[in-house]
Amino acid sequence: MLLCNQIFILFSNLKGNRDSLLYQGHHYLEPDDVKDILEYSELILAHSKVKKMYVLYLDSFKDFKREVLNSLNIDGFKELITEKSFTLKEFKTTLRNHEFKERILYEILREKYY
């Protein structure tokens, strides 16, 4: 299964039957992009109906051949990434301290729900 399909399945499983928005792009993050990720996270989580969001960045899988990645099922793919949960405030700190990493699925939670 192609890597993009695995990412789509991963996020589909996370959302379940709830409404969601999926943005999946293809570009490498530059240092200036951290500011954009921060602003985007704040903007999304400022909406009254949004409780959490997920961010996953995959720079590359240099350690794995394309054939291996394409042969993985969703469970195999999930073994290659780590999941971490943060409040928006904690995520901001992670971004500002340049601790944002690839192959980590960040669950970012709104601090208050109204």
Image: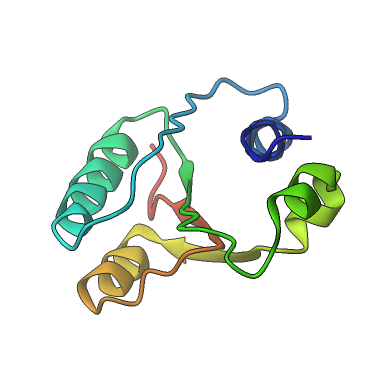
In-front residue for pair 26/106: 26
User: What is the x, y in percent for residue 91?
Assistant: 35, 65
Of residue 68 and residue 82, the one placed in the foreground of this image is 68
Q: How many marks?
A: 0
Left or right of residue 18: residue 89:
left
Q: Residue at x 33, y 41 (%)?
A: 45
Seen in the picture, residue 96 relative to 22 is either above or below; the reply is: below
Q: Please say which color scheme the image uses.
A: rainbow
Q: Is residue 105 above or below residue 8?
A: below
Q: Quadrant of the C terminus?
A: top left
Is residue 72 rendered to the left or right of residue 106? right
At x 41%, y 62%, the residue is 87
Measuring from the top left, give residue 38's x and y in whole percent.
23, 53
User: Who is closer to the viewer here, 68 or 23?
Assistant: 68
Which quarter of the rendered picture does the N terminus lie within? top right
Q: Is residue 102 above or below residue 69?
A: below
Horizontal arrangement in the rendering, residue 108 relative to residue 16 (left or right): left
Observer-nearest of 3 and 22: 3
- Residue 97 found in image quarter: bottom left
- Measured as percent of width and height from the top left, residue 85 is found at 54, 64
Q: Position of residue 26 (x, y in %)?
A: 40, 37
Choose top left, top right, bottom left or bottom right for residue 96. bottom left
Q: Quadrant of residue 48?
A: top left
Q: Residue at x 35, y 70 (%)?
A: 90
